[in-house]
């Protein structure tokens, strides 16, 4: 059910239109290779099982399993927000529940007003495009828009009357409210759990960077070679560390009021940041002890007390700066700035709009083609096409392979488990809960592996409304999968995203402005430490955005050539500026204690 993280990897930057190099990026083997499972895979897996089990068993007890499709829409909201601190998670999951109900309401009203397959497919494709843009703009996920599209598309083709809609929406909202409670329940046991995991990831990434920072970072004053060496792991490690540190700061900024545990976590991020901005010899290098960072990460991730790192000069000012920045974000002007940023991501010049057009055209083509061939459930093709669209065309190709392979294997699993599910209604409920857990347990290894569990679960949901011929279900699902994947990817290749390069250029300008601001704070001794630290965090954020924009554009076809040299030069200069801020802290004290708060 969940998507794999949407943040792209680091493909080789290519100058278009050298199509052969782009084609080499479409090799099937990397797309199907298994990775390590997420460190929090069990959280969405357990949450969705608990959030689904109570409504499922309640409907089983009253003999109304035919209503499970409506309660499941609310229960699936428990998949969202597991990487967010609980203060923000409460708002995010509530927004997911309301968004799910809104999409479902639109589908139910449409289904009650018309039986035209052409209209239903058009509405389904439009909803899929809107859901894709909103999820990408708000960056909610994983699992992103696919769950919304699955629910709204299935509801379009369910028999419906206007008088039934309020009751069905009440079931969704009730199940969603319970899912909200499930998503927030861990706060009663470990209220700083998300912050601890984010800081642990930052420490681990900083340890990797400190171990092998690359030749250019071993001397921050040396501008390094003029050309990028693809075999040098240093840039990859620095970018990964910068992203992890940025995510940790954002998680802490979004958390609730400062507590002793959060104070210790903030100090740990200070050390992780010092390790990746200046991992080589020199001032601040004491924080770059990989084994020490890993020891802190292990204890931070564990259930015991949070380590208390040795104090570093400037730490008190750093923590004051975090409080000030947190206050700004929560003030009215800060909320207005966040809304303006969201509107910019949705505006006329947004790079998300070509992806929305891809989704709209691909889902519509898939649905109409399946309807023309007489398939009774074209919404499966709509969902298949919608699930393909990722940050760029290369990632969409990978998802096409993963979705197709996983769905075809999942159909075989469904054929094997169907006799078991028909033993009794309770067996059917248990099978659905099992595959819901298995999907979340497997999908972080690779999307295709999770799809092996998602497919039988989606097919079993149909059994709640009555038994269907197995051969018909299997044949329709195979046909919908193949046609949906083919037409969906065809639409992705036909609808170009030339705005991807424009996003890189905007990110370059923003990085240069952030670097200039950070350099001014370093050069001026009168600047308050809080301003210097805020400028450094802004520069880190701009470098993360620059790398994401570059990776996204590198995976797109048929666009202007990327400003490759300027991008690499901006990254080198940005990291050198970050390194220049490290000596302002003074040397880190080598205290042996890793005491508890």
Image (tube, rainbow, N blue to C red):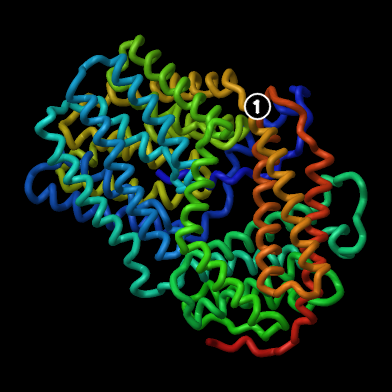
**Residue under the point 82% across and 53% down:** 572
Q: Quadrant of residue 54?
A: bottom left
Q: Which residue is mark 1?
A: 498
Query: In the rendered image, which quarter is residue 416 located in?
Result: top left
- Expressed as whole percent of the image width and height from the top left, the position of residue 406 reads 46, 35
Q: Nearer the viewer, residue 121 or 423?
A: 121
**Can you say whether 495 is above or below 224 in the image?**
above
Quadrant assignment, res 249: bottom right
Along the line of sight, the residue nearer the viewer: 35 or 101:
101
Q: Is residue 118 left or right of residue 343?
A: left
- Residue 27 visible from this viewpoint: no
Left/right placement of residue 288 relative to residue 494 reads right
> Where is residue 170 shown, x and y percent of the image?
17, 45
Q: Residue at x 61, y 30 (%)?
A: 393
The residue depicted at 45 percent of the width and 48 percent of the height is 140
Q: Does residue 106 appear anywhere in the picture? A: yes
Instruction: Please state, as top left, top right, bottom left or bottom right, where the N terminus lies in the image.
Output: top left
> x and y percent of residue 424 in the render?
15, 43
Report the residue at 54% width, 31% height from top. Answer: 348
| Residue sticking out furthest to the top | 372
The 10 Å Cα crowd at callout 1, few under 14, some 14 to 19, many 20 or more, is some
> Tag 1's secondary structure?
loop
Figure check: 102 above or below 275: above
Q: Is residue 263 above or below residue 110?
A: below
Q: Where does the image place residue 209, in percent across and percent down from the top left?
A: 74, 63
View extreme (left): residue: 62
The mark tally for this picture is 1
- Image position of 459 with respect to 483: above or below: below
């Amino acid at each position: 059910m969940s998507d794999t993280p949407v943040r792209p990897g680091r493909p080789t930057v290519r100058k278009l239109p050298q199509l052969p190099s782009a084609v080499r990026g479409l090799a099937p083997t990397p797309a199907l290779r298994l990775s390590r499972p997420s460190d929090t895979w069990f959280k969405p897996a357990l949450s969705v099982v608990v959030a689904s089990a109570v409504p499922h068993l309640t409907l089983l007890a009253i003999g109304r399993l035919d209503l499970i499709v409506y309660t499941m829409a609310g229960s699936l909201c428990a998949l969202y927000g597991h990487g967010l601190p609980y203060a923000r998670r409460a708002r995010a999951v509530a927004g997911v529940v309301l968004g799910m109900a809104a999409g479902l309401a639109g589908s139910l009203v449409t289904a009650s007003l018309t039986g035209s397959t052409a209209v239903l497919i058009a509405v389904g494709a439009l909803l899929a495009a809107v859901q894709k843009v909103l999820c990408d703009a708000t960056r909610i996920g994983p699992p992103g828009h696919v769950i919304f599209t699955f629910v709204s598309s299935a509801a379009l083709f369910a028999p419906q009357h206007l008088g039934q809609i309020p009751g069905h929406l009440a079931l969704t909202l009730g199940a969603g409210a319970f899912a909200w409670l499930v998503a927030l329940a861990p706060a009663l046991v470990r209220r700083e759990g998300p912050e601890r995991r984010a800081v642990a990831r930052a420490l681990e990434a900083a340890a990797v960077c400190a171990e092998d920072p690359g030749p250019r970072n071993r001397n921050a004053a040396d501008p390094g070679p003029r050309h990028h060496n693809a075999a040098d792991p240093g840039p990859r490690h620095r970018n990964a560390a910068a992203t992890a540190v940025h995510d940790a700061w954002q998680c802490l900024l979004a958390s609730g009021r400062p507590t002793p545990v959060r104070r210790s976590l903030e100090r740990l991020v200070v050390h992780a940041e010092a390790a990746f901005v200046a991992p080589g010899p020199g001032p601040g290098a004491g924080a770059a002890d990989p084994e020490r960072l890993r020891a802190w990460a292990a204890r931070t991730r564990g259930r015991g007390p949070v380590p208390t790192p040795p104090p570093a000069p400037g730490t008190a000012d750093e923590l004051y700066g975090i409080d000030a920045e947190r206050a700004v974000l929560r003030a009215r002007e800060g909320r207005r700035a966040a809304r303006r940023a969201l509107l910019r991501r949705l505006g006329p010049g947004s790079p998300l709009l070509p992806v929305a057009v891809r989704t709209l055209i691909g889902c519509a083509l898939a649905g109409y083609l399946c309807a023309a061939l007489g398939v009774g459930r074209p919404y499966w093709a709509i969902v298949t096409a919608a699930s393909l669209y990722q940050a760029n065309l290369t990632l969409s190709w990978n998802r096409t392979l993963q979705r197709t392979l996983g769905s075809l294997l999942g159909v075989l699993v469904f054929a094997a488990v169907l006799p078991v599910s028909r033993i009794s209604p309770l067996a059917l409920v248990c099978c659905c809960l099992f595959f819901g857990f298995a999907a979340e347990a497997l999908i972080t290894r690779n999307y295709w592996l999770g799809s092996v569990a998602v497919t039988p679960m989606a097919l079993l949901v149909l059994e709640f409304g009555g038994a269907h011929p197995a051969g018909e279900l299997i044949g329709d699902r195979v046909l919908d999968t193949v046609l949906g994947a083919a037409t969906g990817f065809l639409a992705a290749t036909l609808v170009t995203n030339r705005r991807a390069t424009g996003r890189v250029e905007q990110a370059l300008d923003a990085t240069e402005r952030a670097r200039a601001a950070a350099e001014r704070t370093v050069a001026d001794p009168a600047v308050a430490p809080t301003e210097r630290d805020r400028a450094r965090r802004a520069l880190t954020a701009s470098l993360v955005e620059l790398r994401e924009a570059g990776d996204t554009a590198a995976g797109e076809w048929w666009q202007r050539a990327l400003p490759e040299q300027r991008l690499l030069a901006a990254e080198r200069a940005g990291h050198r500026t970050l390194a220049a801020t490290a000596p302002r802290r003074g040397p880190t004290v080598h205290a042996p204690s890793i005491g508890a708060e």
